[in-house]
C-alpha cells in the first residue's frame, strides 16, 4: 500500500522561502507594472493510484522537469515504481522512471525546486540526496540519511547554489551542507519539518512548520554553515513557502507576507481578496510573481494588482504543489483526483 509523504500532503495546502539581508528600499512606483496576459495549457499524467507531481524546475524556454509519482494503470501495485522524471520539451510532457535505491527501495522524488544544472549535474531529494546527469535512467546516492543524528528524518528539499555549495533540508528541522568535497550536518534549530527553501546569491531561506498539527513556524536564514532564526511577527499560522529578490522578501501560508529587509522585526501582510491557504511563491521580480495553493488557486501580482487564474485552470478540486518561473514562462505541478497535473503558462507580450 502506498505511503503518502508528508511533503505531498503539506504542499497540497502549503509551501516555503529563502532570503538575504538588504537595506530598506523606497516603495516602488505604482506605474512599475508587468502584464497579466498569461495563457495556460494544462496536462494530465497517469490515470490512477494517486498520481501526483511535487516539484518543478525550468532549465530554459524549451526545457523543464517535474518530479513525483505517476501510475499509468491504476492496477499497478502501489510503490512500484513510484518515482518518475517528467520532461517538458517545449511542446509536450513525457515521463519515465528514474531508477535508484534507498534502503533497498525506490521512493518518490520529493524535490526539484533545488535541482540545479551544475556542470551537467542535477540534484534530487528523495529521502537521501541523489545526483542525476539529465540523461541516464540511474541516479546515484551521494548522501544517505542514515548518517543523520535523527534516523527518522528524511531529506525532502534540495538547493544547489553552486557546485561547492549544496544544501539538503528535511523533516525534524534537518539541514545538511555539501562544500564540494564533504557533507556536514548543520545545527538543528527545530523539530519542525522544512516545507520550502529558496536560494539567491550566497543566501538561502527556509521555512519550517507542521501544518495540520500546530501553528508553530520558523523562518531560517542560512549563510554558509551559519543558521539564523528570523522573526515571524505577527504571522499567526504555519508557513509553507518563501521567495525573495533584494529588497522584497515574501513568505506565504494563510496569507502573503512581505518585508523590505530581513532585519525588520515585523512582516507586513499583503492585501489580497482571497481566503486561500497558499502552498508556493515564486517569480521574476517584486512586480512579477505568482502565489499558488489548494483548490487550484493561482495568483499573479504585477506591481499594482492581483489576477486570479483559478477559473482558467479549472482545478477547483485539485491542488498546486509547486511553481517555477523564468521570464515569460511558468511551470506549475500538482494533482487533481487520481491524476498528476502539469501546466505551462506563457505570457503574451
Image (cartoon, rainbow, N blue to C red):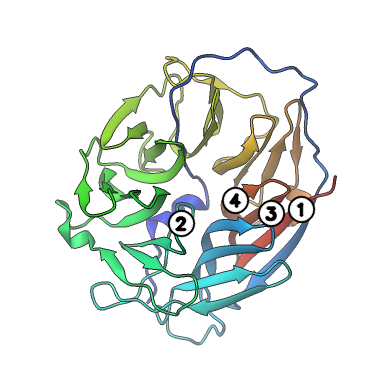
The residue that label 2 is drawn on is 115
- Using residue 303 as the reference point, say whether residue 336 is left or right of it: left
Coordinates of residue 24 in the picture (x, y in percent):
53, 14
The residue that label 1 is drawn on is 346
Coordinates of residue 32 in the picture (x, y in percent):
76, 24
Tell which residue pokes out farthest to the front in this image: 119
Nearer mark to the viewer, of 3 and 2? 2
In front of the other: 193 or 220: 220
In front of the other: 305 or 118: 118
Marks 4 and 3, the one that precedes in the sequence: 3
Note whether 292 is above or below 127 in the view shown.
above
Q: Secondary structure at mark 3?
A: loop
Tell me the distance, in whole angstroms, between the alpha carbons under discs 4 and 3.
20 Å
Tell me the distance, in whole angstroms, between the alpha carbons under discs 3 and 1.
21 Å
Q: Which mark is residue 324?
A: 4
Marks 2 and 4, the one that precedes in the sequence: 2
Note whether 192 is above or below 246 in the view shown.
below
In front of the other: 190 or 123: 123
Q: Which mark is residue 316?
A: 3
Coordinates of residue 311 in the picture (x, y in percent):
78, 50
Marks 3 and 2, the one that precedes in the sequence: 2
Amino acid at each position: 500500500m502506498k505511503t503518502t509523504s508528508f511533503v505531498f500532503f503539506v504542499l497540497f495546502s502549503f509551501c516555503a522561502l529563502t532570503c538575504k539581508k538588504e537595506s530598506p528600499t523606497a516603495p516602488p512606483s505604482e506605474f512599475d507594472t508587468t502584464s497579466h496576459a498569461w495563457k495556460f495549457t494544462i496536462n494530465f499524467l497517469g490515470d490512477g493510484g494517486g498520481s501526483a507531481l511535487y516539484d518543478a524546475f525550468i532549465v530554459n524556454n524549451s526545457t523543464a522537469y517535474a518530479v513525483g509519482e505517476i501510475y499509468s494503470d491504476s492496477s499497478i501495485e502501489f510503490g512500484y515504481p513510484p518515482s518518475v522524471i517528467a520532461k517538458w520539451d517545449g511542446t509536450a510532457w513525457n515521463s519515465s522512471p528514474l531508477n535508484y535505491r534507498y534502503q533497498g527501495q525506490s521512493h518518490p522524488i520529493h524535490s526539484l525546486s533545488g535541482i540545479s544544472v551544475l556542470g551537467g549535474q542535477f540534484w534530487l531529494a528523495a529521502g537521501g540526496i541523489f545526483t542525476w546527469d539529465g540523461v541516464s535512467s540511474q541516479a546515484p546516492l551521494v548522501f544517505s540519511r542514515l548518517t543523520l543524528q535523527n534516523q527518522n528524518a528524511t531529506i525532502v528539499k534540495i538547493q544547489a547554489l553552486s557546485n561547492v555549495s549544496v544544501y539538503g533540508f528535511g523533516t525534524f528541522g534537518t539541514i545538511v551542507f555539501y562544500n564540494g568535497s564533504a557533507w556536514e550536518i548543520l545545527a538543528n534549530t527545530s523539530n519542525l519539518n522544512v516545507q520550502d527553501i529558496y536560494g539567491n546569491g550566497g543566501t538561502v531561506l527556509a521555512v519550517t512548520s507542521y501544518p495540520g498539527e500546530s501553528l508553530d513556524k520558523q523562518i531560517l536564514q542560512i549563510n554558509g554553515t551559519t543558521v539564523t532564526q528570523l522573526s515571524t511577527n505577527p504571522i499567526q499560522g504555519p508557513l509553507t513557502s518563501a521567495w525573495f529578490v533584494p529588497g522584497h522578501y515574501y513568505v506565504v501560508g494563510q496569507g502573503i507576507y512581505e518585508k523590505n529587509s530581513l532585519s525588520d522585526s515585523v512582516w507586513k501582510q499583503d492585501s489580497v481578496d482571497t481566503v486561500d491557504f497558499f502552498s508556493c511563491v515564486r517569480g521574476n521580480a517584486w512586480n512579477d510573481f505568482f502565489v499558488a495553493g489548494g483548490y487550484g488557486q493561482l495568483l499573479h501580482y504585477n506591481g499594482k494588482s492581483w489576477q486570479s487564474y483559478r477559473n482558467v485552470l479549472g482545478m477547483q478540486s485539485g491542488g498546486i504543489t509547486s511553481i517555477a518561473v523564468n521570464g515569460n514562462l511558468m511551470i506549475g505541478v500538482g494533482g487533481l483526483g487520481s491524476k498528476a497535473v502539469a501546466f505551462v503558462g506563457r505570457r503574451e507580450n
